[in-house]
Image: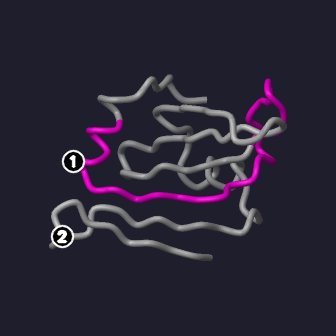
Amino acid sequence: VCCQIGSQDGQTVSTIFLQLAPTNTLGDVIEAHGDPALVSGEPFTDAEHIMTLFYTDLNMAVYVIVDGADGMLSDESPVISIIYTDDALMATVIESGALQAGV
């Protein structure tokens, strides 16, 4: 696990970023927190996509690797990182992105 803590104003913590070994799965996250409110995806490599699952009520974004250009999320999709944000930053992300309703 590796981490980074960020601040928008230089005085208070606005983000906590955790990079994880891919031992946790999307199934683990859904079991613990339910389905995400919003989902976004983008290519990572020619063979993989990164899907971001937003748990807006928890101010949490979960990043999952999906195989293939047309890959589908599954319970076995590995979780590679998690970001916790403050309310203001999560609101900005929700308002600015092309996000889709959860899985």
Image quarter in which the C terminus is found: top right
* Colour scheme shown: one colour
Residue wearing tag 2: 10
Looking at the picture, tell me which residue is in the foreground, 43 or 58: 43
Callout 1 secondary element:
helix
Q: Which residue is depicted at the point 27% across and 62% down?
A: 14
Q: Which residue is depicted at the point 34% across and 38% down?
A: 93
- Is residue 76 highlighted in magenta? yes
Instruction: Report x, y in % for residue 54.
Output: 47, 41
Whether pointer 2 and pointer 1 mark residues with C-beta atoms closer than 8 Å, the reply is: no
Image quarter in which the N terminus is found: bottom right
Tell me: 71 left or right of 27. right
- Is residue 4 highlighted in magenta? no
Q: Counting other residues with Cα less than 10 Å from the Cα at mark 1, is it few (<14), some (14-19), or many (20 or more)? A: few
Q: Is residue 97 above or below residue 48?
A: above
Q: Counting other residues with Cα less than 10 Å from the Cα at mark 2, is it few (<14), some (14-19), or many (20 or more)? A: few
Q: Is residue 37 above or below residue 28?
A: above
Q: Is residue 93 above or below residue 8?
A: above
Q: Amino acid at mark 1?
A: Ala
Tell me: 20 left or right of 56. right
User: Label 2 vs label 1: CA separation?
Assistant: 15 Å
Q: Amino acid at mark 2?
A: Gly
Residue wearing tag 1: 88
Q: Which residue is depicted at the point 21% across and 47% down?
A: 88
Q: Earlier in the sequence, mark 2 or mark 1?
A: 2
Q: Which residues are magenta?
A: 66-93
